[in-house]
Amino acid sequence: MTEQSPRRSSVLLDRLPLPERNFVADALRTETVGGILLLLSAVVALIWANTLHHSYETASDFHFGPSAVGLYLSVAHWTADGLLAVFFFVAGIELKRELVTGELHEPAKAALPVVAAVCGMALPAVVYTVVNVAGGGSLKGWAVPTATDIAFALAVLAVLGTALPSALRAFLLTLAVVDDLLAILIIAIFFTSDLDYAALAGAVACLVLFWLLQRVAVHGWYVYVPLALVTWALMYNSGVHATISGVAMGLMLRCTRREGEEQAPAERIEHLVRPLSAGLAVPLFALFAAGVSVSGGALGDVFRRPETLGVVLGLVFGKTLGVFCGTWLAVRFTRAKLNPDLSWPDVLALATLSGIGFTVSLLIGELAFAAHPRLADEAKAAVLVGSLIAALLAAVLLKLRNNRYRALTAEEERDDDEDGIPDIYVQDRFAYHVRMAEILERKAAEHRRLAALARQDRDAGGPDGA
């Protein structure tokens, strides 16, 4: 009998393959810009709501739209149900790509971010529930502190000037993708009102048509954009949250290239839609969702009411402990090993950063306390406070390791052979060493020439010979 070779251990937070690294870099670049716009929108909303409260309320409550088809909605409603469908469409594409070609494609690699994300959503819900059971509060908001906002987290990194290695950024992105999936399921299962089966059947029929058009390779935005709008309207009127239509369409896009294609449809469409989502849809939602009172009394109430205290503690402690412990358990009970260039404090800093819950947390807060507008506003204030505390804690932890991160990032991006590909991906290839030999020989020849000139100056009584 031949001896079987042992299975290789997977490496947690390992270096990404080059195509994956390039995709993650492009995606996060857009998300970072969008996150900064999101941060600015939140600041503008807070200033507007606390200085010109009446005009803010008037603008948020301004209604427009075709009432004949049930779409006479307020501006705040349009941004939450309409524009966020674009955000969830991109989330659906990201999830499909991760499942087909990304980190979630291989079960062994998928286990780590999935376990971390599940624990990172379960523990905040447990923390919220315990606080509200003990304090006699409402349990309706258990899902509010469960979501991570990748754009806001990246905006914090941009403001701090922290150069996270690509492996940490990719883990954060994958964590957020799984987090979005679980948030979508929560919205679909727990925040679906009375169903209109005729409208739901119409939405499903439109989704089937969308899938069939993809299969037969029908092209043209003038086909898909009207179909997407009809699908969204039917989903909205069905009682299922309208953003689910965006997720479903995103999941139906093809992520693999066919012969003769430079880009898969999902890749091409995501490249077009992601700036719209990050630069317009999400910031506008934040503008009309984050406008809450920040007076001393209102902020004090955040730490006195069990519902709001549960949200803050869920984001700050529940998310951090959930992601960290989930990652540790996944490593402890699998064959995975932590990247030797990193350490567990790096995982803790990343887990703390995941406590920044903004876009989806604000949306779930509105849905959970729809019958109690004042409590919904207080829950929004709790999301802002909890996210701010998590951001400050993450800033401290990340700054402690920033020099190490900069060194790792510089090593990842070094391109001494000037071929446009980081050396770390090609330094074991013959062609790399040939190019480096040629470059070093040119440099050596130049230094020999300069040395000869220096010797001539010295012999002639120049500065060196004086």
Image (spheres, rainbow, N blue to C red):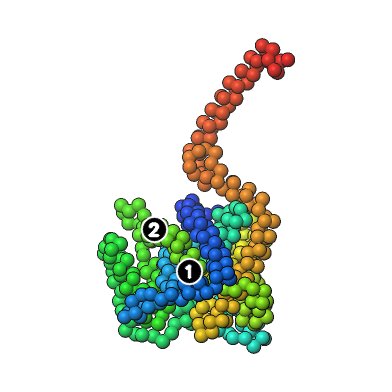
Q: Vertical placement of 199 versus 216: above or below?
A: below
Tag 1: Cα neighbours inside 10 Å, few (<14), some, or many (≥20)? Answer: many
Please tell me the numbered disc located at residue 110. none
Looking at the image, residue 243 sits to the left or right of residue 290; the answer is left
Determine the residue positioned at 36% across, 55% down.
Answer: 263
Quick one: label 1 or label 2, which is nearer the N terminus?
Answer: 2
Which of the labelled discs sits on residue 285, or is there none?
1
Residue 284 x %, y % = 47, 66
Q: Which of these two is toward me, 189 or 283?
A: 283
Residue at x-position 55% and y-position 62%? 39
Residue 49 coordinates in the image, percent (x, y): 55, 71
Residue for point 38% across, 75% down: 64
Amino acid type, callout 2: Leu
* Residue topped by disc 2: 272
Query: Label 1 amino acid?
Result: Phe
Q: Residue drawn at (42%, 61%), measured in percent from left and top?
A: 276
Q: Is residue 48 above or below residue 264?
A: below
